[in-house]
């Protein structure tokens, strides 16, 4: 089985220098429509980026204000003079570094768990045939439809019976045993876009289902896996409900819970909260940026059709 | 492993023991909660030196006395494993409170080496979810900071331990504290005081009054005086208002409830079975607010308020956008930690909320947040000691000393103290009449909490919103609110 | 049943054990195990609770259909919250998906600094909810907010947005557009799997950009689009946080979303039995809608594999 990758491999095509030259070629090309189209795209993206980045900018700006300035009307867009009191308060409010390590641990392990389960189970639903598969798939979807607020207490009782209260198990184990219906569904849809001919060719070569899963389909599913990695990382990083209910001792707490401490009953310490949010969001942005390497056009699959 | 056969004799013997134990337990169980007294094996005399701060009534003098105290300590059978009690609370405002709580806990643990206090903080909205899930799951927190609306419900569902026997045993003196009827249903005690705050005062901008040539408000003001002043103080050019005369809050607790009560009405009857907002007196109170908002237009209505501020009235007031407000405690926390905003022309002062006519009864809708013990706690005695300590003078003083503490104390002596208590002048706003704020607490009234309070109150607010939006008149919203409220009260 | 098994059956011999008939179970076993251990019991426990009056201490008290009776016949706010949620869903889901799709197409084009732009659009999805909420409150300010100022330039007097009963839900729909970053990411992943050679073939056949979009991109993306549609509907029905933080159900219950109402009964009124009944009614509704979507999907979703 060979996969023809066309004139240029994907890797070469993505090289910045190649893209830049391609871009210039576009601009210089005689197709005015293409030029206008691209200009339009750039315009939309630039305006959109400013709009979408506004909350982020406001978050950073507020972290440098005083508590009074943060709720001032009309709003103060530029925090001059800069105050670092928000950062001071954030750092001393709770053991930040400790919370950060806790959060890292929980987030990374659950991310691995989600990736493993969603790819395995997604493959099972997408490619294998077994009795009751479609019924079970419906069950999978159904599990997402019941609001979690009403299953919190029975779930708590189960974990309590297992002796897992005030440990990380209730937060981590469900990523490995159970997984997330959302990610499983996503993987299933994605795998179903990959042609079955790949499977068949592999089977002729003697691969069993697991080899097909591991060696053929998973490498092709990098964009979906990257998506799950990013989503689960962000989700677990920001999740406060699980730690809030299952953790008791201060030294086990996570960042997300810590940040919510700033939302008081009478007043919210906005500068400190924004400072904390800004610091904790930076790793997420880095992860996302890095994951972009997997969001590139996949290998061209010529030579396999018909 | 040997497999023991359950022969008849063993079975009968264990059944008998089980039966006997059950009978004994049944005999021992009493319907009312009892304090289990530990067996005294030793009587130890403990000497300690305590510094007592006495406030001599009537004078600003503070006398420090050194007192030698001899205590009889009943020792429990040794050796004892330290018990851990979990204390749950939410962050009220600043994280400074959390630090104070830690300090008080540390001191307590030094004095009580057999008790370990684990403080568990959450954000305000998360706290109640945590309480419910953990309590229902059997892992409730031993000590819970409590809020009135939730208290009635939790108590009704038997989640809270009755404290009457403990209070009686240890002779706790409630007369030194500001208390709230809501927490003493049927005359029994369920809570220990900790914090509390209230609502109705007028905060006004002295500079705005000077500019407009209006005399400052006095404690004898009537509603007519107030309306007249608001009229003069409202600065309007065409459609835009550069300064409102008054900013009326539209929530119930610190807003419209007060106006209804001031006129002589109330929102519910005394045994909490019928909503009484269709009473003409209540309607009159609401009408007054609507006149301010839509007739004389001296107060912004709900939409206009939203246009100006997303975070309440603190900022509009300190930006000079309103000459008067009934902001609770006028954001003392920000004043104490950050001082008066310098570039704005606002000089705040407080006065008691005016009465409709001279001599009318005063109201100060307040709410206290006391501490409670979970009824399923395994360390009730230790938890009791802790909340007793939190209600004590030292803990109260520590709380008051928190940077930016914005509230009056529920411990009355501290409200008369100007060295370490509430009357200590606030730097930058020394002219602030703190005595008036303390004076207002004398008229403390509760919020009529009952088991369906949260559901009921939100139904009322949804109806009242139509009034603040200007879509319906006073009589109509009051009647609809009464119907909506009764529907909740009558639902099982 | 695979053809081989059928064939052997027809031939009169007992069907052999085919590993391939059962290996699927192995693959889905992590999920299945989790379902049995952690999923089934809470799921049906909540159903049971919906028929009870739940005291915090002590066993729930069976009251039969009483909760459901109250819900359907004595609770006007149930109907209000259902209406609000449906209104929001109908507005937010299509608009959000279209915007996400268009953005994904743009962000997949051969442009410079693509990773930078993609990160910009994903930022609100990782930014603290409180920051976004406050910012939106400013932008949607009826008198001086950016949105109404822009509208005034074209001569429209902007509405009261979150302070108006009629415009509160549209305001929240507007706010939800800031969260399309996640959907954009999913679409980007889907776009990577569209085989390049199909575009080239279409171009050779003379298809315009629009034609390529309609006949190559969308059909190849249809499984992904279907996913976002189903999840979009489920997600919109679970809308809670923004309504809780920004409007708290107001004004006058105009933004009383279903889950917000449920949350109040569960964790403010401590009425878990009634909340469970609310949850199960929602479950049935969403299940019905999803089943409908599944049935219709046969017509337009194209699975390559």
Image: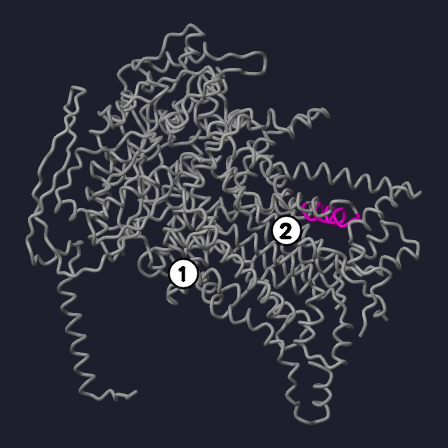
Residue B303 spot, x, y in % from top left: 53, 27
Q: Most extreme residue toward the top, as rendered? A: B213
The residue nearer to you, when weighing B55 against B125, is B55
Residue bounds of the magenta highlight: C96-110
Query: Marks 2 and 1: in contact by CB < 8 Å?
Result: no
Specify the quadrant of the image occupied by residue C12. bottom right
User: Between tags 1 and 2, which lies in front?
Assistant: 2
B174 within the magenta span: no
In percent of width and height, residue B430 lies at 33, 18
Query: Label 1 to label 2, Cα distance in Å?
Result: 29 Å
- SS label for mark 2: helix
Q: Residue at x 18, y 70 (%)?
A: B22
Q: Is residue A103 left or right of residue C124?
A: left
Q: Are the residues flagged by discs 1 and 2 from a single subunit?
A: yes
Locate residue B385, reporting x and y percent. 20, 48
Binning the other alpha carbons within 10 Å of mark 1 as few (below 14), some (14 to 19) or many (20 upward) gives: some
The chief SS type of the magenta part is helix
- Residue beneath label 2, please? A288
Q: How many neighbours does mark 2 have within 10 angstroms: few (below 14), some (14-19), or many (20 or more)?
A: many
Which of the chains bears the disc numbered 1? A
The label number, if any, that marks residue B417 in the structure image: none
Query: Foreground: B45 or C199?
Result: B45
Residue at 73%, 82% in the rendered image = A206
**What residue is disc 1 on?**
A167
Task: Tell whether C156 sits left or right of B12.
Answer: right
Mark before the other along the chain sequence, 1 or 2: 1
Query: Dot 2 falls on which chain?
Result: A
């Amino acid at each position: 089985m060979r996969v023809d990758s066309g004139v240029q491999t994907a890797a070469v095509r993505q090289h910045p220098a190649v893209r830049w030259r391609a871009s210039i070629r576009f601009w210089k090309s005689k197709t005015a429509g293409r030029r206008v189209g691209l200009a339009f795209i750039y315009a939309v993206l630039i305006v959109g980026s400013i709009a979408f980045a506004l909350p982020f900018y406001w978050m950073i700006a507020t972290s440098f204000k005083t508590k009074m300035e943060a709720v001032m009307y009309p709003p103060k867009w530029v925090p001059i003079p800069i105050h670092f009191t928000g950062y001071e308060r954030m750092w001393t409010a709770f053991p930040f570094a400790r919370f950060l390590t806790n959060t890292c641990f929980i987030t990374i392990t659950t991310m691995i768990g989600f990736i493993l389960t969603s790819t395995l189970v997604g493959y099972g639903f997408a490619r294998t045939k077994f009795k009751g598969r479609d019924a079970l798939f419906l069950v999978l979807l159904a599990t997402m439809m019941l609001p979690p607020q009403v299953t919190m207490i029975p779930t708590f009782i189960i974990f309590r019976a297992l002796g897992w209260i005030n440990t990380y198990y209730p937060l981590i184990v469900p990523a490995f045993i159970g997984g997330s219906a959302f990610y499983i569904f996503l993987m299933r849809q994605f795998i179903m876009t990959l042609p079955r001919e790949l499977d068949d060719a592999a089977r002729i070569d003697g691969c069993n289902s697991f080899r097909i899963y591991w060696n053929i389909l998973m490498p092709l599913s990098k964009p979906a896996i990257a998506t799950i990695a990013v989503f689960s990382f962000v989700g677990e990083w920001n999740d406060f409900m699980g730690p809030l209910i299952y953790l008791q001792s201060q030294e086990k707490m996570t960042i997300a819970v810590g940040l919510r401490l700033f939302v008081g009953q009478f007043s919210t310490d906005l500068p400190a909260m924004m400072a904390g949010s800004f610091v904790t969001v930076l790793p997420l942005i880095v992860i996302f940026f890095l994951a972009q390497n997997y969001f590139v056009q996949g290998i061209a699959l010529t030579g396999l059709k018909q | 492993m040997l497999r023991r056969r359950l022969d008849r004799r063993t079975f009968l013997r264990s059944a008998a023991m089980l039966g006997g134990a059950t009978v004994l337990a049944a005999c021992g169980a009493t319907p009312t909660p009892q304090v289990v007294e530990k067996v005294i094996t030793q009587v130890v005399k403990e000497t300690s030196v305590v510094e007592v701060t006495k406030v001599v009534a009537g004078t600003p003098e503070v006398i420090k006395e050194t007192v030698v105290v001899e205590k009889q300590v009943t020792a429990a059978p040794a050796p004892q494993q330290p018990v851990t009690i979990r204390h749950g609370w939410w962050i009220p405002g600043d994280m400074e409170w959390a630090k104070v709580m830690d300090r008080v806990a540390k001191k307590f643990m030094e004095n009580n080496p057999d008790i370990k206090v684990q403080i568990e903080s959450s954000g305000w909205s998360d706290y109640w979810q945590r309480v419910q899930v953990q309590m229902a799951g059997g892992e409730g927190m031993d000590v819970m900071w409590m809020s009135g609306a939730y208290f009635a419900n939790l108590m009704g569902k038997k989640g809270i331990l009755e404290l009457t026997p403990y209070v009686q045993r240890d002779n706790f003196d409630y007369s030194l504290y500001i208390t709230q009827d809501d927490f003493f249903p049927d005359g029994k005690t369920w809570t220990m005081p900790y914090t509390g705050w209230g609502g109705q005062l007028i905060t006004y901008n002295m500079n705005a009054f000077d500019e407009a040539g209006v005399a400052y408000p006095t404690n004898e003001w009537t509603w007519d005086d107030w309306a007249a002043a608001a009229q003069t103080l409202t600065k309007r050019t065409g459609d835009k208002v550069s300064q409102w005369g008054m900013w009326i809050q539209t929530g119930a607790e610190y807003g419209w409830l007060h106006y209804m009560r001031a006129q002589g009405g109330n929102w519910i009857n005394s045994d909490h079975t019928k909503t009484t907002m269709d009473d003409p007196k209540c309607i009159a109170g609401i009408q007054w607010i609507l006149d301010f908002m839509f007739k004389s237009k001296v107060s912004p209505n709900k939409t206009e308020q939203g246009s100006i501020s997303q975070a309440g009235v603190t900022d509009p007031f300190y930006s000079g956008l309103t000459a008067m407000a009934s902001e609770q405690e006028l954001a003392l926390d920000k004043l104490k930690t950050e001082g008066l905003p310098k570039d704005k022309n606002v000089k705040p002062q407080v006065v008691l909320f005016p009465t409709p006519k001279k001599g009318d009864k005063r109201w100060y809708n307040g709410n206290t947040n006391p501490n409670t013990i979970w009824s399923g706690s395994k360390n009730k005695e230790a938890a009791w000691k802790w909340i007793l300590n939190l209600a004590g003078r030292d803990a109260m003083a520590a709380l008051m000393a928190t940077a930016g503490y914005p509230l009056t104390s529920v411990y009355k002596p501290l409200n008369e103290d100007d060295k370490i208590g509430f009357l200590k002048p606030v730097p930058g706003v020394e002219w602030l009449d703190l005595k008036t704020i303390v004076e207002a607490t004398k008229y403390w009234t509760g919020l009529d909490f009952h088991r369906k309070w949260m559901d009921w109150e939100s139904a009322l607010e949804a109806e009242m919103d139509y009034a603040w939006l200007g879509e319906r008149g006073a009589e109509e919203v009051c009647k609809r609110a009464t119907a909506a409220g009764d529907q909740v009260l009558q639902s099982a | 049943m695979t053809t081989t098994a059928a064939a052997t059956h027809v031939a009169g011999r007992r069907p052999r054990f085919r590993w391939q008939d059962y290996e699927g179970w192995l693959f889905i076993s992590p999920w299945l195990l989790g379902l049995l251990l952690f999923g089934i019991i809470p799921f049906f426990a909540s159903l049971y609770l919906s028929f009870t009056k739940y005291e915090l201490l002590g066993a729930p008290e069976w009251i039969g259909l009483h909760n459901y009776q109250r819900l359907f016949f004595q609770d006007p706010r149930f109907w209000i919250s259902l209406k609000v949620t449906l209104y929001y869903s109908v507005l937010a889901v299509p608009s959000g998906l279209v915007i996400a799709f268009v953005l994904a197409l743009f962000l997949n084009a051969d442009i410079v600094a693509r990773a930078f732009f993609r990160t910009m659009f994903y930022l609100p999805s990782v930014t603290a909810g409180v920051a976004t909420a406050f910012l939106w409150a400013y932008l949607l300010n009826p008198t001086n907010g950016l949105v109404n100022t822009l509208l005034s330039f074209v001569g429209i007097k902007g509405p009261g947005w979150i302070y108006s009963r009629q415009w509160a839900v549209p305001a929240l729909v507007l706010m939800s557009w800031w969260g399309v970053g996640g959907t954009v990411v999913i679409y980007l992943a889907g776009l990577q799997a569209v085989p390049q050679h199909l575009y080239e073939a279409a171009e050779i056949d003379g298809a315009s950009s629009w034609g390529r979009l309609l006949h190559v991109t969308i059909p190849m993306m249809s499984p992904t689009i279907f996913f976002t549609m189903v999840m979009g509907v489920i997600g919109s029905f679970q809308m809670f946080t923004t309504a809780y933080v920004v409007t708290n159900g107001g004004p006058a219950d105009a933004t009383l979303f279903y889950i917000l109402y449920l949350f109040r009964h569960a964790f403010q009124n401590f009425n878990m039995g009634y909340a469970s009944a609310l949850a199960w009614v929602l479950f049935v509704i969403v299940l019905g809608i999803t089943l409908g979507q599944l049935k219709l999907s046969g017509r337009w979703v194209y699975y390559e594999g």
